[in-house]
Structures are given as structure tokens and as C-alpha cells.
Amino acid sequence: MRVLLTAFAQDAHLNGIVPLAWALRTAGHEVRVAGQPAAVESITRAGLTAVPVGDDHRMDAVIPTVGPGMLMHHLDRDYLENRPERLSLDFLRASNAMLTATFYAQINNDSMIDALVDYARFWQPDLVLWEPFTFAGAVAAKATGAAHARLLAFPDLFANTHLTLRRRQAELPAELRDDPLEEWLAYTLDRHGAAFDPDVVTGQWSVDQMPPGVRMELGLPTVPTRYVPYNGPGPAVVPDWLRRPPERRRVCLTLGLTIRDTEFPNAVDVDDVFASLADLDVEVVATLSEKELAQVSRVPDNTRVVDHVALLALLPSCSAIVHHGGAGTWATAAAYGVPQVALGWMWDAIYRAQRVEELGAGLHLHSEGLTVEVLRDKLVRVLDDPSFTEGARRLRLAMLSAPSPNEVVPTLEKLTARHRSVAAAR
Amino acid sequence: MLTDQTNSELGRHLLTIRGVQFIFGAQGDPFAMILRAGDDDPLDHGARAREQGLHESSIGAWVTAHRELGARILGDERFSPRHAEEGPQAHPGVDVWDNPLLCHVVPLDDAQLNRDPADYRALARAAAPLLSAEALAARLPEIEAAYRQALAATGERFDLYRDVAVPAALRVVADVLGLPEETRQRLPELHAGLATALDAGHCPQQLAAARALFTAVTDLSTELTRLVGSGRATGLAALDGVSPEDAVAVGTLAVVVGVEVTATAVCNAVRVLLDHREEWERIGREPERAGAAVREALRLAPPLRFESRIAREQAEFDGKTVEEGRRVVVLVDAANRDPEAFADPDAFVPGRADGDRSLTLLGGSAAPVTEALVRLQTEAAVRVLAELRPGLRTGAEVLHRMRSAVLRGVLRFPVA
């Protein structure tokens, strides 16, 4: 097969597609990974073949304007909410309008979509696999007749929210149904001679790397797949100090990659975090960039600060992790059975953190509730109460029980043959 | 052609401005919340705006909800619906992230909604034989008959907006303008496209609605141009000493503003009056009460909930400088309940001593042309309905058109 993968240019969202891209490659398929020019270096550092498409998106320039409003609207919402006053129709409409206008349509800029369609017309992929915000992939598939699926590396709550909006609006007269996401996709598809289909939002199926208990069951066709950590284009090098066991229990502290190259706020004060760790009998490894470190007034004696270390090399040696709630960090910790104190203030970060608490694999701490005392208390509990280690081990086993990327390739071959239009079949 | 933008270009433009309204609304900006046009009560946002005094909205406008300041702005011709620059009022392709010029969302110049105040006064003089209060008063029996006939065609349960207000207003405007039969036949379809006109310049419509509006405006201009050139001896074609362009402008305003604003005013007035049944029943017995009752109802529920102008000169208000070229918004619905201007502002008091302080403009800046057409019809509708249906009750919930931040236009108004 020819498989075209695509993710908008942001490492955190590219990382989740890399292991399956390699599984397809080593199964003998032709694989290309398309993204804006800014994504090319990260794609090629992952050893994959890059196709730069269109101009770079402007999301980073837009974030200072839209970030605060986006944050205030979505603050503290768990999308499994059943209280209609919290996820009212007005709330869902506002969320959809904001996300479509200021996020989806920004990271899928027109030149990127058009160039991706052009490339798909030239290269004729059998299957387009797209990162779940990179709707350009679905457009390219519809324009060429390729099969297409989403590749999820985080819980599917954005599709869930959109489907909830559509369900609620279905009860209203047609004149009151307002779905900017559908409208944007409809005129974008129309530009390329294709028509809107609900699967442009959800994929013809989804490859979902979340384990049971975390994966959202939306009634959509799903191929459960094991999450295999890939921590991004930063050099994955095992340093000397990671070649012997830690002398004390090791705690990882990271605020993730995305904050390093965007303005998106994590709302975490590192000084507070350090103060809560300083007196504990542990060895802290903090991954902080120069920019993050500049905000810190004092690094505690028990803390080693490194600019970068691949989490897949570090976490197997850790007894606990304190992190910002991001998708890759969460999933890597889960995959290695490390108990977590997961911060986070919106969207999937809250969802993931709450699930990890429910599964007994760690504790959630809302970023706004972060104080020295509360964080220390939660971390001590996670370190000292063996039930968290046991819960994290169960979560790791749940993740390992899913078929590996290599094992799902034959399923993808079958699904592609079923969904690819005749014209695209060679 | 109102725009040569492709669907993708226009769609992205509308989508982005809409997104900005939601983003700034989430940060608590009252005018942005009003522009969202959600299920929440716009008066709550207006009250918050009033607490802030004259203030700059993140949407890129100075906003006031005070009656006195609002009256000064709306009575000052240096505040115009349009910028000083000639040509269509639209800002396509403006990067709203860097420079939020969020007025004139789509070009509505052919709908005659972006003219200078002096133009509207001149058009009102030109239109006087058709649209002045005197001219329309002379046609009152005919206007009332339109509402009686529309009502007679309904059953026990009907929709006030769809079955009475719109068909009667269409018929009145067709009669007043002397539209030929083929244009009359097309009028309901044209109105369906035009219904969003008052909203579309401020609150981005869905792409299909924006396209339908453009098509309807173009088609209406074509029909009216043909009529004005027809040499007919009555109505719009017979306006004396008026240029063909001005005659088309008058006809356009009568249809674009005269129908949807009238229908909105009728629904708003009936809704307020049905909440005050004793007054409704008294109007049925004493129809001369309708004038004061309608004026008071439209103070509480103005058909245009806010007015937007461009400062054509720098102005100072409350020690704040409104620079030339900036947008100024008067929240009429909130200003009409300003406790500094009205005694017991939320109370419905027909004939109240301070009733003449209401800022309600029946047609916005085009009110000099359309005011009498809207007001006389609203009064006639209320008289007819109160007389023939004294027991009228609202049925299921009134539904409002989406994205209707200016009119809060009616979609369904079930009554029985």
C-alpha cells in the first residue's frame, strides 16, 4: 500500500503517529509523512520521509490573542460531564465555533490543505492516516478516493464534544443547527470537488492508542492499538547517569515539549513545584529548557536539571512523575507503569488526569489548585502508598494487552481495501 | 456582485470573525457576548456594559449602554454607518488577529444600509409621498385590512411571525411601492434571503445565509430598477423629481428594513403586551391606546437592539477620546432601561412621562425613511390582533433566528 500520514506542524502531535508509520514501513508499505514545512525536520529526524505541504500555519502568532479566551471557556470542564448546565448547548456551540475558527482552521491553513490534496492526487495513496486535528488528511482522502482513518494518541473527547453538539442540535429545527466545523469542512471539500461526510470529522475508522478505561467509547469503528512511546525529535541518548540504578527513589518532573516552542500556558509555577520537592528524600530529575529554567529562583539540592532526556530512557528508573498533563508524557508514564501526579487545567489533560486517579495509578492536581503543600502531600502519597504502584502496573498491563502497531497492520490493510474507492485501487 | 470572494475566502472570513466573537465573549466582554447571540439574555450583558460606562470592547468598538450618551451619539451626524472612504463598506481579507476591524462584516451597500445620515434624510424627503407618516396615515384602512386578511387566513393556532406579521408586511410594502405582479410573487422568496440583512453586517451569518442574502439584494435591486424605469403611474415608479438611483434606494429600504423590522416590531410588541394582559384587553376595546402601548413596548423590546456607527471625527465623551474612524456602539435595549433616564425602567407604563427618551430607532440609521412604515404597521397589527383575538395566548416557546444579534429575529412565534 501507499500510506500517507499527516500531522500539523507541532511535535507533540507528530510524535503519536511515528511508531505506526514505522510499523507500516517495516511491513513493506510505502510511507510518506506530510506536514507544513516547519514539520519537516521533526519528520526526518524520526527517520521518516517528509512531504512539506503549503505554508507554515500561524497558530503560534494567534495564540496570544485567542489563548486566554479559549482557556477561560474550557477551564475545568470534564467532557464526560452529564450536568447540562456545564456543557449546555451554548457552551458546546461556543466551543465548536472557537475551536474551528481559531484552531482547526488555523493549523489546517488553506495552502497546506491544497498542497496536500495536490500531493495525494499525484501520489495516489491507498490510505491516509491523520492526526485527529489534521482534517486536511480527510479532505485529501475524499478528493482522491483513498481510505482514511484517524490516528489517536489521546482520548477522543474533541470528537465526543462535536458528536454531542450534533446530537443535541438534531432535536432542533434545521434553521437552528449551527456547526461551523461542518461548514468549514464542507466549503473546503467543495473547493476540491468533494462533499461533506460525517466521516471527515471522525475518520472511516480510528486507530486508538489509549487503553481501556481511558479510551472513549463513542460507538465509532475503532482499531485498538498499543501506545509505543516515541518522545520526539530531541536526541534520544542514554546519558551516563541513567546507566546505574538511582540511589534514592527517583521522581521525574517535566512540563512537556509544547510549552518550549509555543506561548500556550501550562499555568504551572516551577518554583512552587521545586519547593514542594526540595525536602523529600528523593532524587528529582527535572527536564527544563533554558527558558523555563530562567523563571526559577532556586534549584533544590536533590534535583538534577537536564535540558532534555527521552522519557522512554528516564521513566523506567522512576518511582513517580510530576507532569503538566500532556498526552505524550501521560502515555509514556502509563506505558512504563510509573505512578503520576498529573497537573492540568483543561481539555484532555483534565480528562486523563482524572482517569489516572480513578484507575488508582496516580493523582490529579488541577493547576489552579497547585500549592507547595498540596503537591508535596500528593506526591508523598503516590510514592509511599503501594496501591499507586500497583495501579500503575495494572495500567501498564492494560496498555501492553493491546496489539502492537506491527500487529494491527494487517487489519489496516483489510480496512483500506474495504474503504478505498475503486478509482483509487491500483 | 456584492463580493467576488470564493466560498472558501468568504467562509473563512465569516468563520474567523465569529470565532473572535466567541473568544472575546469568553473573556467577559459584554458586546462580544451580545454578538454571540446565544440563549442567554442580552439585557444581562447590556447591564454589565452599563456598569463599565463608555468602554472599549475587545471586538474593536467603543460601547455605551447609557441613554444620555447614546442619545448624543445617535443624534450626531458625525457618527455615520460608514467610514469616510468611498466605495463598498467591507473589510475582506483583513487579518483579524492583528487588526480587529470587525465592523461591516459583509458589504451591504446595495441593501442601502451603509449611507451617511444626510443621505437618509434626503431619501426620506424623496420618499415622503409614499413613506411619510402623513402618506401612510392616509392608507391606514388598507394597512389594517392587510393584517385583518392575514389573520382571517389563520386557524385557532397560528404563528404570529410567519402567518401574520411577515405576509401582512410584505403585502403592505408591495401595495405602497406599487410592485408589479411578478415582483409581488417573488417577494416572499426575496424576503427569506433578506431577513438577515440587519444582522449580517455585525454578526457573521452562515455561509449559505450570507450567499442567499447577497443574491436577494442583487435580485431586489434588479426588480426595483426595472420597476423605476417602467414609467408606471403609481407607487415607486411615480415618485416625482427623484433620480432612478434614489427611487431604487427608497424601494430597497422599504423592503429590506420595512418588512423584517416591522415583523420583528410586531412580534416584540405583542410579546410585551401579552405579558400585560389587562393592557392587551383594553386595546381591544379602546384601539386608540395602541400608539402609547406600542411605543412603550418597543422601548422595552426594540426591534434593533443596538446601533453601530463610525466616528467620522474625533470626539470626547466622559473624558475619553473616541478617535476618528473608530466604531461606536449604542446598546439601545440596555440604554432604554437606564435607571438614570427612566423611572422604574423595567416597568411597562404606556404613556410614561419619560417615554420620549427611548432610543428605539425603527430602522436604525435608515429610520428617517422607514420609521413611519414600521410604526404605523406595528400599531395597526396590535389594534387588529387585540380587537379580533382578545384572548390571544403565547403557545410553545418563541424561537429566535440564530446569529441574530441585532434583531434577535423571530423564527417561530406560536400563539393561539
Image (cartoon, coloured by chain):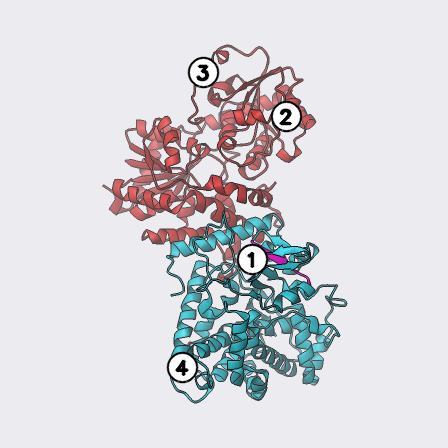
Chain colours: A red, B cyan
Q: Are marks 4 and 3 in contact (CB under 8 Å)?
A: no
Q: Are marks 2 and 1 in contact (CB under 8 Å)?
A: no
Which of label 1 and label 4 is nearer to you?
A: 1
Residue A194 picture location, percent across and down:
33, 52
Is residue A13 within the magenta segment?
no
Taking depth in this image into account, of A342 and A82 the one nearest to the observer is: A342
Within 10 Å of the Cα at label 1, are there few (<14), some (14-19), or many (20+) other Cα atoms? many
Which of label 4 and label 3 is nearer to you?
A: 4
- Tell me the chain of label 3: A
Amino acid beneath label 4: Leu
Q: Are marks 2 and 3 in contact (CB under 8 Å)?
A: no
Q: Which residue is mark 2?
A: A271
Residue range (magenta): B60-66
- Tell me the chain of label 4: B
Q: Which residue is mark 4?
A: B227
- Tell me the quarter of the picture where residue B411 sits: bottom right
**Distance (Cα) linking label 3 and label 1:** 59 Å
Amino acid beneath label 1: Arg
Instruction: Report whether mark 3 lies on the same chain as mark 1.
Output: no
Q: Residue furthest left?
A: A426
